[in-house]
Amino acid sequence: MQNTSGEQASQGQLHALFAAYLGWTLDAFDFFIMVFVLREVAASFQVPVGDVATAITLTLACRAVGAIIFGRLADRFGRRPVLMLNIVCYALLEFCSGLAPTLTAFLILRALFGVAMGGEWGVASSLVMESVPEKWRGLASGVLQAGYPSGYLLASLLYLALPWLGWRGMFMVGILPAVLAFYVRRSVQESPAWQSFSAEDRKVGIWQVLRRSAGFASFAVVLMMALNFFAHGSQDLYPSEFLGAQHKLSTDMISAIMIVANIGGLIGGIAFGMLSQRIGRKWAMTLAVLLALPVLPFWASASTPLMLGFTAFLMLVCVQGAWGIVPAYLNELSPPSVRATFPGFVYQAGNFLAAANANIQIWIAGHFANNYGLTMALTAGVMAILVALLVASGPEPKGARMAAKPRGTAPKNDGTGILTASVL
C-alpha cells in the first residue's frame, strides 16, 4: 500500500488496517443478515414483520452502550486486546441469535449484539488512524469503512443459501468472525499513539471531555444521526421490503442486486476517502451526499432488475462515499486521550437517535400504499441535505495530531466555537 506522496506503509500498519477492515466487515456481515430474513423470522415466530424489525431498532440503539464500554476499556488498556474481546463477543451473540426459542429471547440477543457491534468500530478506527501516517489517512479511512459494504456483500451471498440453511443457520454462520481474534493477537501491534499517552492521559473521563466540549459533541452527534438515517434509511428495508415485498423478486435476484450495489459501496468508500485527502474531509463528504440527490428519483422508481441494480450501485457509491470519510473525520476531531471512546460514542449516539428508522419507515410506507421506494427516497433526500449543511458549516479536521499533545499546549478555537481536535 502506498500513499499519494509515495510513502510506503510498514508491515505493522498494514496488519492493523487489514484487521480493522476485516473486523468491520464481519461485524457488518453479522448485522446485515438480519435485514435479509425479516419475513422468515416473522413467519417462524408468527408475528408481523414490524415486530421483528424492532430487532434492528434495538441493535442500533444499543450500539451507543457498546461504544462507551469497549471504548473506555480500549482507552485504558489498549486498542489491541479490547478489539479481540469485542470480536469474540459479537460473534458469539450472533451465533446465539440463531438458537433463540422465542421472539423475546431473539430481541434480547439482538440488543446484546448491538452492544458488541457498537464497540468494534470505535476501537478499530482509533487503532488504524493512530497507526498510519497522516498522508494516507484518507485512503485508510476509505478502506476501513469499505468493510461495511463488504459485510453487506457477504450477507448478500449468504442469502443465496437461505433455502438450505434457514434463517437460524444464517445467524449461526456468524460465529466465524471469532477466528479473526487469533489474527489480531498474532499479527497486530498496539497503537503507537496510545503507547505515547501517560497514565494520567489514560484516566481522562469521557464525561469530562463531553462537558468541556458540549457544543462540539452535540454537533458530532447530530451529524452522525443524519448520516445514520441517510445510510440505514436507504439500506435496511431495501432488500426485504422494497425488492422482496414490493417488487416480488426472487431470493437469487435480490442477492444479485445487493452484490452489485455493495460493489458500488466499496468503490465509493475508497474513492471518496482518497479524495478527502486532497480536498479535505468536509468538502469530500458534502460532495458525496449531494451527488445522491439526482440519483434518488431513479433509484426509488426503478422497476426492472437492470435498473434496480444500476441505481442501487450508484446510490451506494454516494452513501458509502460519505461514510468512507467518517473514520478519519471523527478520529481527527477527537481528543487524543479518549479517541477509542469519543468517535465511537458520537457515532453510536447518533445511531441511537436514528435507531427507530426501520419502524418509522414501515409506518410511513403504510400511509403510502406500502411504497417503500418513495419512503426511502424521502428519508435519504432530507438527510442528505441536512448532512451537507452540517458538514459544510463545521470544522475541517484534516491533518490533526494523533499522539498525545505536548504538555502545556493551550486549546485553540477554530472560529466556530468548537475546540479543534488537534489541540483538545
Image (cartoon, helix red, strand yellow):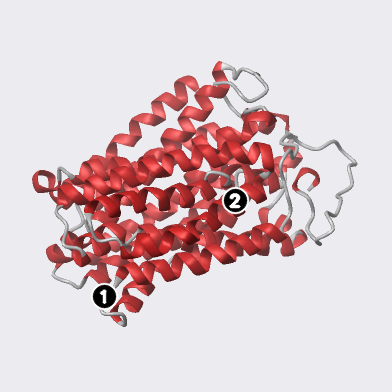
- Residue 200 found in image quarter: top right
How crowded pointer 1 is (Cα within 10 Å; few <14, some 14-19, many 20+) is rated as some
Amino acid type of the residue that numbered disc 1 sits on in the rendered structure: Asn
The Cα atoms of the two marked residues, 1 and 2, are separated by 32 Å
Nearer to us in this view, 111 or 122: 122
- Residue 232 found in image quarter: bottom left
Q: Which residue carries the number 2 mark?
A: 285
Nearer to us in this view, 66 or 73: 66
- Tell me the quarter of the image containing the N terminus: top right
Question: In percent of the image, x 48 and y 66: which residue is there?
Answer: 381
Which dot marks residue 2?
none
**Looking at the picture, how far across and down is residue 112, in whole percent?**
38, 55
Question: In percent of the image, x 71 and y 58: which residue is there?
Answer: 394
Question: In percent of the image, x 58 and y 21: which residue is there?
Answer: 2
Work out which residue is located at the far bottom of the displayed protein and give it. Answer: 367
Would residue 162 be visible to someone looking at this image?
yes
Q: Is residue 408 left or right of residue 266?
A: right
Say which element carries label 1.
Answer: loop
Q: Which residue carries the number 1 mark?
A: 370
Would residue 102 be visible to someone looking at this image?
no
Amino acid type of the residue that numbered disc 2 sits on in the rendered structure: Met
Question: In percent of the image, x 44 and y 41: which residue is there?
Answer: 86
Position of residue 326 relative to residue 208, above or below, is above
